[in-house]
Image: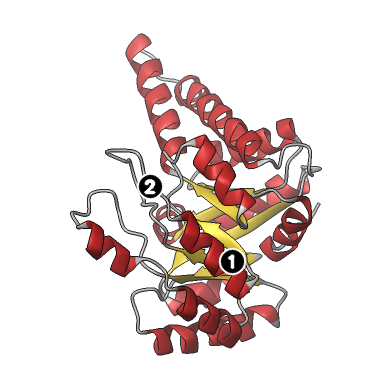
Amino acid sequence: MALVSVAELLRKAEEGGYAVGAFNTNNMELAQAIVRAAEAENSPVIMQASQGAIAYAGLDYIVALARVAAAGSAVPIALHLDHGTNLDQVYRCVENGFTSVMYDGSKLSLDQNIANTRGVVEYAHARGVSVEGELGKIGGTEDDVTVSAREALFTDPAEAEEYVRATGVDSLAIAIGTAHGQYKGEPQLDFSRLETIRQRTGIAIVLHGSSGVPDAALRRAIELGVRKINIDTNIREAFVWALRRAAAQNPDELDPRKLLGPAREAAEAVIREKIRIFGSSGKA
């Protein structure tokens, strides 16, 4: 099966009332874990790579991994660029096999974000590639901000409506209280804001920084229109912790396969669990 676009997966998710998991990869073992989990759960899946992952593994390697995975799998797989802030790189991903890209202009003025995103949408759509945009600032969990400051970073519903109408994006990442990285406490999501944004835009909503968000909160967000959920930190935790355990238990082991194999299995288990929470299990 060839790679599919994220827009196609999200249309089906909207019809079925579930969310599709978007899981980050930067090497072969993580790519395999993503695909094995999706196949085991008979679920559609989004394999995504950040700019950092591309810098580490190489654009051609990331695309090749995804293409091999899709060719040998019966479940639909999309390849997505996560948080593309560099326009040149966004366009390179479109040209070199990514079936979806995220242009993140959230740090720009609204007008500049709209202008840049519209250009990406026109270019990508002409080539059958879907586009995710972002409004609001999804920070890291280390950020020391007050409640009022956090509110100022949240996505404004009126701006979201204007942005979606002006750009033609296929999905929208919003800031409602999640953050990238490991949480120090339990995140409090602004469900009222999510509901308002969904009503005013009618678009598929994307939730970033979802590792560590309680299962009940994720399910509620899906009920309110979230159709794509990003998971990275939870996968890294499982992978690295399993790798450390294997190395500690076998300090003389020199075969990397015997260390990376358990790490891959641990990552796969986490991804399968998330797929079930998102409701996409059995929806391939």
Taking the spot 73% from the left edge, 54% from the top edge, the residue there is 13
Left or right: 169 with respect to 233? right
Q: Amino acid at mark 2?
A: Gln
Taking the spot 39% from the left edge, 73% from the top edge, the residue there is 106
Q: Which of the 4 image quadrants contains residue 240? A: top left
The C terminus lies in which quarter of the figure? top right
Q: Position of residue 102 (x, y in %)?
A: 52, 68
Q: Amino acid at mark 1?
A: Arg
Circle 1 Cα neighbour tier, 10 Å, few/some/many (<14 / 14–19 / ≥20): many
Question: Marks 1 and 2, how far apart in space?
Answer: 18 Å
Left or right: 281 with respect to 163? right
Taking the spot 29% from the left edge, 69% from the top edge, the residue there is 152
Label 1, on which residue? 198
Q: Position of residue 147 (x, y in %)?
A: 24, 57
Which mark is drawn over residue 152? none
How is colour applied across the structure in the image?
secondary structure
Do the residues under discs 1 and 2 have CB atoms within 8 angstroms? no
Q: Nearer the viewer, residue 43 or 94?
A: 43
Taking the spot 54% from the left edge, 77% from the top edge, the residue there is 91
Residue 105 visible at all: yes
Q: How many marks?
A: 2
Circle 2 Cα neighbour tier, 10 Å, few/some/many (<14 / 14–19 / ≥20): few
Q: Position of residue 227 (x, y in %)?
A: 63, 55
- Residue found farthest to the front: 192
**Circle 2: element type:** loop
Q: Position of residue 209 (x, y in %)?
A: 42, 50
Residue 138 versus residue 200 in the image, above or below: above
Label 2, on which residue? 188
**Circle 1: element type:** helix
Q: Nearer the viewer, residue 215 or 97?
A: 215
Sequence-wise first label, 1 or 2: 2
Residue 251 visible at all: no
